[in-house]
């Protein structure tokens, strides 16, 4: 099936987080995923694409993924709904400004979501359907967006090229993270491509074969 949407990555914050703009190529309707900061840079990329942002999707509540939500929402034309993550990350969305102050990152704000997500829900971009998978471990409420038709996923900080998400937080759970990857992501198929929260994307097959955290 031909891909009917484009993917534009905008690295934001000192953590170089991959904010993603997914745009339906026919209508130019778009979603922004994980606007962690640098809202002006994201808005400029949206304008350059001539994209009509309808929704903001969040994979999880960390400051570098959600700290720019309110600034971006305020700069975009029309009503923009913020969707996600799972409700178990509500405490993180409420503490972004506090965490940003500890890291010395100015301009990040607590984020307000319009709707939390649960496993099994679907989101839409034009004719494209994205399944929602709940994959906790990095954070309790982390979700992943899966487009089965395009063989494509947005995995946030669950899985990286050659690595996996950190779990050395008080709320982290390494066993749950690995179980989610093995039971929910890898069965999607080796040909599934994904983009992640930091660094280059990969395929599930490449990670199944070579990611040191998934061996044995």
Image: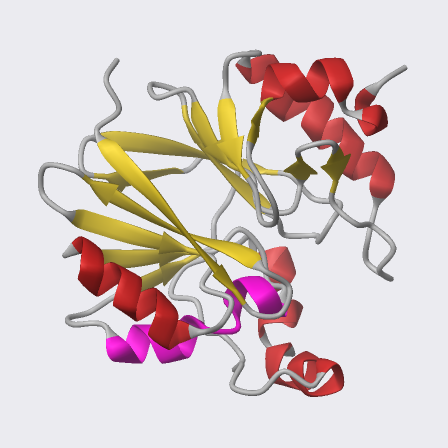
Q: Which residue corresponds to the image point at 65% horizontal and 78% vertical from the top-left?
A: 95
Q: Residue furthest left?
A: 27
Please identify the quarter of the rendering in which residue 83 is found. Answer: bottom left
Q: Which residue corresponds to the image point at 83% horizontal and 46% vertical from the top-left?
A: 173
Left or right: residue 49 versus residue 98 is left
Left or right: residue 185 versus residue 78 is right
Left or right: residue 170 versus residue 25 is right
Residue 146: horizontal and vertical position, in percent? 45, 30
Residue 149: horizontal and vertical position, in percent? 33, 18
200 within the magenta span: no
Q: Is residue 89 above or below residue 153?
A: below
Q: Quadrant of the N terminus?
A: top left
Q: How is the image coloured?
A: secondary structure
Q: Is residue 89 above or below residue 71?
A: above
Please identify the quarter of the rendering in which residue 102 is found. Answer: bottom right
Q: Quadrant of the C terminus?
A: top right
User: Over which residues does the magenta segment extend?
Assistant: 63-75
Left or right: residue 99 versus residue 150 is right
Q: Is residue 179 above or below residue 49?
A: above
Q: Observer-nearest residue: 11 or 54?
A: 11
Q: Main secondary structure of the magenta part?
A: helix
Residue 127: horizontal and vertical position, in percent? 19, 31
73 within the magenta span: yes
Count every numbered label the image shows and give the total.
0
Q: Which residue corresponds to the image point at 42% horizontal and 20% vertical from the top-left?
A: 151
Residue 51 visible = no
Residue 185 visible = yes
């Amino acid at each position: 099936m031909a891909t009917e949407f484009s993917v534009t990555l905008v690295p934001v914050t000192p953590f170089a987080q991959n904010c993603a703009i997914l745009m339906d190529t026919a209508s130019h309707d778009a979603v922004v995923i994980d606007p962690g900061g640098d809202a002006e840079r994201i808005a400029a990329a949206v304008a350059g694409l001539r994209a009509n942002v309808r929704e903001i999707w969040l994979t999880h509540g960390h400051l570098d993924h959600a700290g720019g939500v309110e600034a971006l929402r305020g700069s975009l034309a029309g009503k923009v709904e913020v969707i996600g993550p799972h409700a178990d990350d509500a405490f993180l969305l409420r503490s972004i400004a506090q965490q940003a102050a500890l890291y010395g990152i100015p301009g990040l704000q607590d984020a307000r979501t319009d709707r939390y997500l649960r496993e099994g829900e679907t989101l839409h971009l034009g004719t494209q359907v994205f399944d929602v998978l709940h994959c906790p471990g990095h954070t309790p409420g982390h979700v992943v967006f899966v487009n089965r038709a395009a063989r494509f996923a947005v995995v946030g900080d669950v899985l990286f090229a050659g690595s996996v998400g950190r779990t050395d937080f008080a709320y982290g759970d390494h066993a749950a993270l690995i179980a989610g990857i093995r039971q929910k992501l890898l069965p999607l198929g080796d040909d599934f491509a994904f983009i992640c929260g930091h660094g280059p994307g990969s395929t599930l097959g490449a990670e199944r074969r070579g990611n040191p955290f998934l061996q044995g």
